[in-house]
Image: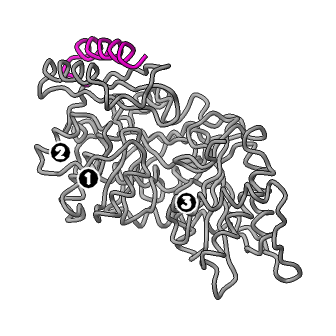
């Protein structure tokens, strides 16, 4: 039986993989594990619970709230808000834990549960493992120790959460956005109200698309994984830029005034230079992953900013930032973490800071993003191979060395075993897209030959 907790909580098809019974059981288990760890000692525990607009979030939220309250935890229901809002409110309200129900950019039938510790930080792996072990033991029949009478948790809506979070976002800006026209694509998700409100309060003229969630349309043709509508809207409305969120708004991609995509690496490059100018880029370093575009690495080197690279996944970026005290990190996908303002990736905050840089400099987003040249990148998945031998195959090592010699300093090769599937990912960057495709194809063949 595989581990329930993945890199971003527990996810699956709602009411199939992720059932109401599981949501309730995991919530009770989380309350018991945190109580045993001393988190609740000396006071009555409080949890913040939020969700994205998926239809399944309605019954899953009810199950989570019931589980927590039955375990003696008071619950503040904040309703539909982004994942980073739940993290922020967990910290701002000094709550003992936070729970977010969302499957981020996944299709509508999926859903997920993510737990936050006190302060709004991701739970440690050890605590997730203990929650899973406790949940499984009780799912097989072991009885719970249940409070009664006044010991049960109380539940109330916390409608103030929306305004508190928006105020936090606007307060984090170095300058206002007056004079900017911004198109916001809310992916019919958790940022549908928050993001337009925050940009408007900061002074921008706001045009919205993808901001009419009905429980069924989240991520459907809109958002950071479907940029075409945003690109068209930015050009149509002659906007200065466009901002696209995913379903739970922990990520952000952008579009410049010409309709061209500005990805997470480019956003990081712009923010890194802005923060260094303001004296906020600790260590003159930014944290990315091994998938960061080579153009980003070359640009940061040219600008005197160190790029520290981690394994793929925003959790690894965050761990490195905390360990080494860095202020900025993120991924090409648009997960950007500004640690002085947020404990997790925050798409609305990222978009606001990007727009603030445009407003402060008077330069276009295209001009700012041109600090780096995004080199062509080709990714090929090679299935049904022994991914465990990627690092030990001499034949594969020889093929990689030959490819690296051909690419020289203007290209890069990365072979990465998938963390969830029986396949190897071959990534090649080169100055020319045809060369990248050619080298990637040859390496994919070499992976099949050596590991098949």
Q: How is the image coloured?
A: one colour
- Quadrant holding the N terminus: top right
The residue at 42%/49% (across/down) is 314
Circle 3 packing at 10 Å, graded few (<14), some (14-19), many (20+), is many
Report how far apart the C-alphas of labels 2 and 1 lie in the structure.
9 Å
Circle 2 packing at 10 Å, graded few (<14), some (14-19), many (20+), is many
Mark 2 or 3, nearer chain start: 3
Q: Position of residue 141 (x, y in %)?
A: 84, 58
Mark 3, secondary structure of its residue: helix
The residue at 33%/36% (across/down) is 291
Residue hosting label 2? 300
**What range of the chain is rendered magenta?**
429-452
361 horizontally vs 225: left or right = left
Circle 1 packing at 10 Å, graded few (<14), some (14-19), many (20+), is many
Residue hosting label 1? 286
Vertical placement of residue 220 versus 361, above or below:
above
Res. 277 image quadrant: bottom left
In terms of depth relative to the viewer, which is nearer, 317 or 79?
A: 317
Mark 1 or 3, nearer chain start: 3
Q: Which circle marks residue 85 in the picture?
A: 3
């Amino acid at each position: 039986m595989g581990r329930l907790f993945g890199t971003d909580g527990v996810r699956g098809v709602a009411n199939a993989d992720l059932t109401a019974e599981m949501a309730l059981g995991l919530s009770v288990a989380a309350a018991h594990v945190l109580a045993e760890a001393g988190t609740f000692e000396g006071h009555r525990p409080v949890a913040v619970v939020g969700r994205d607009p998926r239809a399944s979030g309605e019954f899953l939220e009810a199950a989570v709230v019931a589980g927590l309250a039955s375990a003696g935890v008071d619950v503040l229901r904040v309703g539909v808000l982004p994942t980073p809002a739940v993290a922020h409110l967990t910290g701002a309200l000094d709550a003992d834990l936070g729970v977010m129900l969302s499957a981020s950019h996944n299709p509508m039938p999926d859903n997920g549960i993510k737990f936050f510790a006190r302060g709004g930080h991701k739970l440690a792996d050890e605590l997730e493992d203990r929650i899973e072990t406790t949940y499984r033991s009780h799912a097989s029949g072991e009885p719970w120790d249940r409070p009664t009478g006044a010991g049960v948790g109380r539940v109330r809506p916390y409608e103030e959460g929306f305004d508190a979070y928006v105020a936090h976002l606007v307060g984090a800006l170095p300058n206002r956005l007056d004079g900017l026209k911004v198109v916001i694509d809310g992916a019919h998700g958790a940022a549908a109200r928050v993001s337009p409100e925050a940009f408007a309060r900061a002074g921008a003229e706001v045009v919205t698309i993808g901001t009419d969630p009905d429980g069924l349309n989240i991520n459907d043709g809109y958002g950071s994984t479907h940029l075409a509508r945003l690109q068209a809207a930015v050009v149509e409305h002659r906007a200065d830029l466009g901002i696209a969120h995913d379903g739970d708004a922990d990520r952000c991609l952008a579009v410049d005034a010409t309709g061209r995509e500005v990805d997470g690496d480019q956003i990081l490059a712009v923010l890194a230079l802005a923060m260094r100018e303001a004296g906020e880029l600790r260590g003159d370093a930014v944290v990315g992953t091994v998938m960061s575009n080579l153009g980003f690495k070359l640009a940061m080197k040219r600008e005197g900013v160190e790029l520290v690279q981690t394994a793929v996944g925003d959790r690894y970026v965050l761990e490195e930032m905390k360990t080494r005290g860095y202020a900025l990190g993120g991924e090409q996908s648009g997960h950007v973490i500004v640690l002085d303002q947020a404990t997790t990736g925050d798409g609305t905050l990222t978009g606001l800071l990007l727009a603030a840089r445009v407003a402060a400099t008077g330069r276009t987003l295209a001009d700012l993003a041109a600090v780096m040249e995004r080199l062509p990148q080709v990714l090929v998945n090679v299935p049904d191979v022994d991914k465990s031998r990627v690092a030990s195959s001499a034949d594969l090592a020889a093929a990689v060395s030959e490819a690296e010699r051909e690419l020289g300093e203007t290209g890069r090769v990365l072979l990465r075993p998938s963390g969830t599937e029986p396949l190897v990912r071959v990534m090649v960057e080169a100055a020319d897209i045809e060369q990248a495709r050619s080298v990637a194809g040859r390496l994919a063949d070499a992976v099949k030959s050596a590991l098949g």
